[in-house]
Amino acid sequence: MDTEKKKIEMKVRSSQACIRDGYQLYSANFRKIFHATWWLAIGFALLAAVAQALPVLISPTLLLPASILAIVAVGLWLAAAKWRLKKLQMLPPVTLRYGSWLAHVGKLLLVSIVCLVIVAALALLTTLPTVILITANWQSQVGMLYGDPSGMPENVKWLSIAVFAIAGFIQAYVWLTMVLPMYLVKISMYMQDKEKDEFNKKTI
């Protein structure tokens, strides 16, 4: 990802360096990333809005399919965004040999867990308005079951969908923070394998 300030260097990194450098690259190149992926993020936001609206606005029994839809949406978004960044040559092409992932599974798991914790913390902040709206909707529905008036505005459904979509758009770029640290892990694995192969050739 070439910019005047930050670019990806092909070198071996520790787990800590992959996380640190990945987030630095993401923040330094956010405008370029956003410009390349905003239209994909809209698609994710719409899917996320549908997933959140199903159990809240239609029926709580749809919580399981809504959760599955949300997971699928995240997977599709990350895959599509990564494809887009590669297509625009923002990510250098790296091909790992067969079985390389297993040899570096410790680093892979460590970086994945740390990134997921960071994503969870950031997602919690971005979903606070959504959580408040969901809670208000559920309280209103429970009250209506006991004969109380709704207490919610007539346009609450459209308001809820709009809030869900906006929150989903923000969350798209929260999830995207995982891509660069994980990609740096891949580069590190590639460089370690390359150095090992070169060393073996010299010793033969």
Image: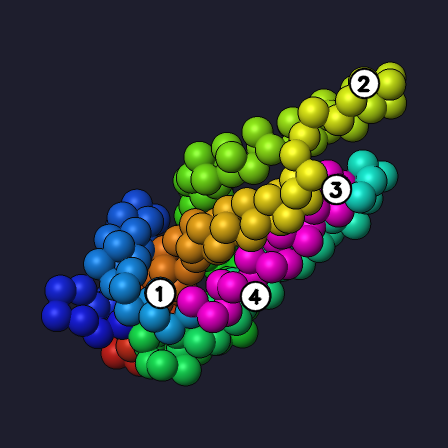
User: Mark 3 or mark 4, which is nearer to you?
Assistant: 3
Name the kind of residue labelled 4 in the image. Answer: Gly
Q: Which residue is mark 2?
A: 148
Q: Amino acid at mark 1?
A: Phe
Q: Position of residue 69 (x, y in %)?
A: 71, 55
Circle 2: is it few (<14), some (14-19), or many (20+) Cα within 10 Å?
Answer: few
Three-letter amino acid code at the position of disc 2 = Asp
Q: Are marks 2 and 1 in contact (CB under 8 Å)?
A: no
Please tell me whether mark 4 sits on a helix, a strand or a loop: helix
Marks 2 and 3, the one that precedes in the sequence: 3
Q: Are marks 1 and 4 in contact (CB under 8 Å)?
A: no
Q: Earlier in the sequence, mark 1 or mark 4?
A: 1
Which amino acid, mark 3?
A: Leu
Front in this rendered view, residue 164 or 105 = 164
Foreground residue among 87 and 199: 87
CA separation in Å, label 2 and label 1: 46 Å
Mark 1 — residue?
A: 34
Mark 2 vs mark 3: in front: 2
Earlier along the polypeptide chain: callout 3 or callout 4?
Answer: 4
- Residue 59's place in the image compared with 189, above or below, is above
Residue 57 disc label: 3
Q: Main secondary structure of the magenta part?
A: helix
Residue 121 visible at all? no
Identity of the residue drawn at 68% across and 53% down: 50
Question: Mark 2 or mark 1: which comes first in sequence?
Answer: 1
Q: What residue did someone put label 4 on?
A: 43
170 with respect to 144 (left or right): left
